[in-house]
Amino acid sequence: MKYLILTGLLLILSMITYQDCKERQVNWIFFPVAFFLSIVNSLRHVTADKLLLDAGLNAIMIAILFLFLLMYTKIRFKGQKGLWQLIGVGDLLLFVLLSVNFALLNFVLFCLISLIVSLGTSVFYKYKTIPLAGVQASCLSFALLLQETAEMNLFNEYWIYQWM
């Protein structure tokens, strides 16, 4: 059963990646389905209480990030462009999807790495706009596969504490 859930989630993430990179828009139905499958998959690794706490903390981080993005766009473009002209709704929905897959420090680290990969992908393929949701979906696929094959837990932050 666990492999069926993971396979379904990876299939949907690959569809998000394909559609975002090819068409720069993603069918909205993929996000709630992937969100549900991510919750079910995450509950195999942590308790519901820990998942709710981590998802809440990650949602606060997303809100802070988008608040800074909003302020940046107001200052940078002097009100001529809104935030939603620069970042798609699919990108926000993917951040929400990511929030139920990681503990807080792992979430921050994943976001940093996936944003760097997004920028590198955009430069390498010479995209005019960055397919953020698609690249982050493929990075999430890689992280989920790593979690299953290397038996690591994306909700365990102990390895980060060892480096501090």
Image (tube, helix red, strand yellow):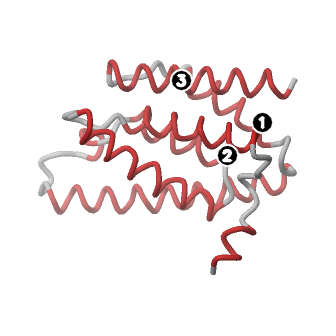
Look at the picture and state if 73 lies above or below 85. Answer: below
Q: Mark 2: which amino acid?
A: Asn
Label 2 vs 3, first from the N-terminus: 3
Whether tag 2 and tag 1 are in contact, CB under 8 A, the answer is yes
Please give the name of the residue rendered at 67% of the width and 46% of the height, measured from the top-left corner.
100
Label 1 vs 3, first from the N-terminus: 3
Report the disc number at residue 101.
2
For the residue pair 83 and 50, the one nearer the viewer reads as 50
Please give the name of the residue rendered at 84% of the width and 28% of the height, measured from the top-left corner.
2
Q: SS at mark 3? A: helix
Look at the picture and state if 10 lies above or below 152. Answer: above
Q: SS at mark 1? A: helix
Look at the picture and state if 22 lies above or below 78. Answer: above
For the residue pair 3 and 31, the one nearer the viewer reads as 3
Q: Mark 1: which amino acid?
A: Asn
In three-dimensional space, the C-alpha distance between marks 2 and 1, rounded to whole angstroms, equals 8 Å
